[in-house]
Amino acid sequence: MPVDRPTDAALLDRARRGDEQAFAAIVERYEGRVAATAIGMLGPGADAEEVGLEAFVRLYRSLDRFRGEASLSTYLTRITVNLALTEIERRKRWFDRFRSIEEAPADAVGVAGKPDDVLDRLGRERELDRVHRALDRLPADQRAVVVLRWLDGLSTRETARILGAAEGTVMSRLKRAMDRLRRELDEHD
Amino acid sequence: MSETERQIRSVAGQMQFEPGFSDRVLARVRELESGEYEPSGPQVSPDGPDPLHFHLRRAFPRLAAACVIGLLALGALALAGDTSLAGSPLDALLGLPAETLETAFALGAM
């Protein structure tokens, strides 16, 4: 007999009452979404992990205030995107924009699982690296749209709500991003 | 689905944090609870990155305190009825008489 998966609301309620395991379950449930958003926005490495950690810490700190007007997934994605945008601004300010991807060690990419075939693994890492490089060349607003729409799989409406932009703006940013990504990806084929 | 979209989507599942991420989150939460952890960087609300708002909020108490001190100093001077400061420091340096309301009226009557 399958065990019922606790709902977000039930886990949040337990976490509010100090149940650490419940909060850990929330982290495990949304870790993948937060990772795709943070790594998609910032590239692999310590900055993306820091944004991920901070997103969950902020959720923890606002457990009492979180009343579920937005879904937990939307709430966490919004915090992660905003933290990542702030980090991109910081990088711009300090001119260290180029260090993240160029200097990221191969093992920091965080490829999931244990692939049997080394060539297959190398091929996937290469593909991941190509995508990171192409994403890194996009302006932050276009990158956020691509990450939310394609990596997180959100709808145009959800993406617009998270970014505080009109749906038309999201679509035009996605179109411009797609043209640019196509050129970047073709260039490095 | 375009080829570009397919390529981007194909790597989504590979974007993961290093194993043990939830343990690191819980460790940070425990640091927070014990008061050892101070969040770094600008405060960001879930509604948007608005560093200006947070900088203004931090700057406001200092500006307000400086304004209150200035107002108190001016009020004290006014109460003391000290007219020696009616002229500017440049006037005093050049030995010019201080301008007062009376001298200003006298100039108009000339």
Image (tube, rainbow, N blue to C red):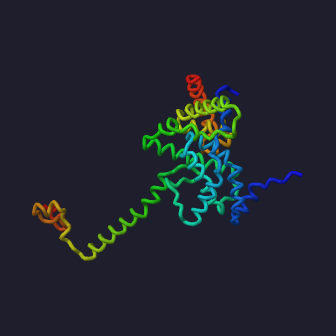
Residue A101 in the figure: left or right of residue B2: left
Q: Which residue shows up at 38% across the image and 67% down it?
A: B65
Q: Position of residue A178 (x, y in %)?
A: 61, 29
Residue A144 in the figure: left or right of residue A153: left
A29 versus A171 height, above or below: below
Q: Quick one: which residue is furthest to the bottom in this view?
A: B80
Of residues A176 and B68, which is closer to you in this image? A176
Q: Quick one: which residue is furthest to the right in this view?
A: A1
In terms of image quadrants, where is residue A152?
top right
Q: Position of residue A167 (x, y in %)?
A: 64, 38
A156 versus A123 height, above or below: below
Q: Position of residue A136 (x, y in %)?
A: 54, 35
Of residues A110 and B43, which is closer to you in this image? A110
Residue B36 in the figure: left or right of residue A111: left
Q: Which residue shows up at 32% across the image and 67% down it?
A: B70
Q: Which residue shows up at 76% across the image and 59% down it?
A: A10
Of residues B89 and A175, which is closer to you in this image? A175
A73 versus B34 height, above or below: above
Of residues B102 and B87, which is closer to you in this image? B87
Q: Position of residue B5 (x, y in %)?
A: 66, 30
Q: Which residue shows up at 54% across the image and 53% down it?
A: B44
Q: Quick one: which residue is furthest to the left in this view?
A: B95
Count all numbered tags in the image, as a single digit: 0
